[in-house]
Image (tube, helix red, strand yellow):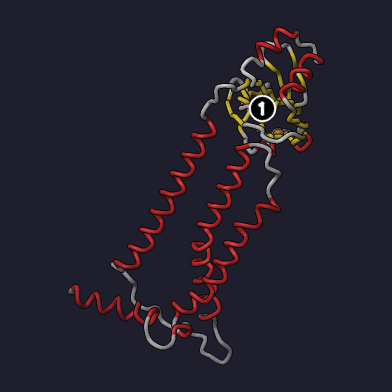
Amino acid sequence: MSSEEKRDEIAAVVEPVFRGGPLWKRPAGKVLIIWVPMTIIGLLLAFFAPGHLFPENMSAEQEDVKTTFILFTALAAPVAAVVWGIALYSIVGWRKKSGKSDTPPEDGPPIRGGTIATTIWLGTSVILVVVLLVWGMAELSSELAPQQNAMQVNVTGQQWQWTFSYPGTGVTSTQLIVPEGRQIHFHVTSEDVTHGFWPVQLGVQIDANPNVTTLISATPNKLGTFDVRCSQICGLNHAYMETTGTTVTQAQFNAWLVSHGASATSVHSYAMSAK
Ligand SMILES: [Cu+2]
């Protein structure tokens, strides 16, 4: 087939979609009519739903997670709306209508070499993927970047309890107490099976594996209590493997360590880089 014939063949299929008659009567117009409101609904969900669905922001990381969620949902909204638009148009517009023949209409010729269509979907996909990748890498590296006054906390999961210890102070607790405004490095491990360390309102999560120590950091920026849960199904009482975390001031934190048996010297050296 010559390239001219090929072009004519493609045009015969593509043109009725985009040309001829008023816009709302053409397939492309009908898809557009579905696409616009669905995109608007998607964008409204992206911007307003997280405020109701997300846990309270109690760390810099949780704020980043929320922003990332909003951005990714907003970018996905028009893409999802195209898929739904075409699907709904096909289901409604090409259904068997009453009184019409049972024989489905014949398929048109296959579209091959549609340069414009290919360029649009490939170009859009590449742009979206690159934006998401760059954003994701930047967010991840900013989360993992160690701060000067970082504080170390050891986290151990076991069926079905969390234990937190504060190196050098001799203090061990089943409640997680952290000071406000400092990056906390959580060194996470497990004594038995795989658990998932998830301080919910701090917006981070990492697996607790036996014989391995994983590291995650968060910077609590709001005083108050938060939930600590297990995010990996780890056995019969997995659902009850939760405890409370509390963000306090540095002075309260130091006093708490002392009240749990830490010497003043060890607290001083542990919290030395405190402001
Ligand atoms: Cu679990």
Instruction: Give the position of the C terminus as an image quadrant.
Output: top right
In the rendered image, residue 50, in percent from the top left (x then y), is placed at: 65, 52
- For the residue labelled by badge 1, is the local secondary structure a helix, a strand or a loop? loop
Q: Residues within 10 Å of mark 1 (few under 14, many from 20)?
A: some
Instruction: Give the position of the N terminus as an image quadrant.
Output: bottom left
In the rendered image, residue 101, in percent from the top left (x then y), is placed at: 51, 89
Q: Where on the image, by quarter, is ligand 1?
A: top right
Asked if residue 136 shows in the view, the reply is yes
- At label 1, the amino acid type is Val
Relative placement, left or right, of 242 versus 86 is: right
**On screen, residue 171 above or below 77:** above
Q: Which residue is mark 1?
A: 193
Residue at image x 50%, y 63%?
Answer: 78
Relative placement, left or right, of 203 versus 134 is: right
In the rendered image, residue 261, in percent from the top left (x then y), is placed at: 79, 11
In-front residue for pair 232/124: 124
Asked if residue 237 shows in the view, the reply is no
Q: Quadrant of residue 237?
A: top right
Q: Quadrant of residue 217?
A: top right
In-front residue for pair 29/49: 49
**On screen, residue 32 above or below 134:** below
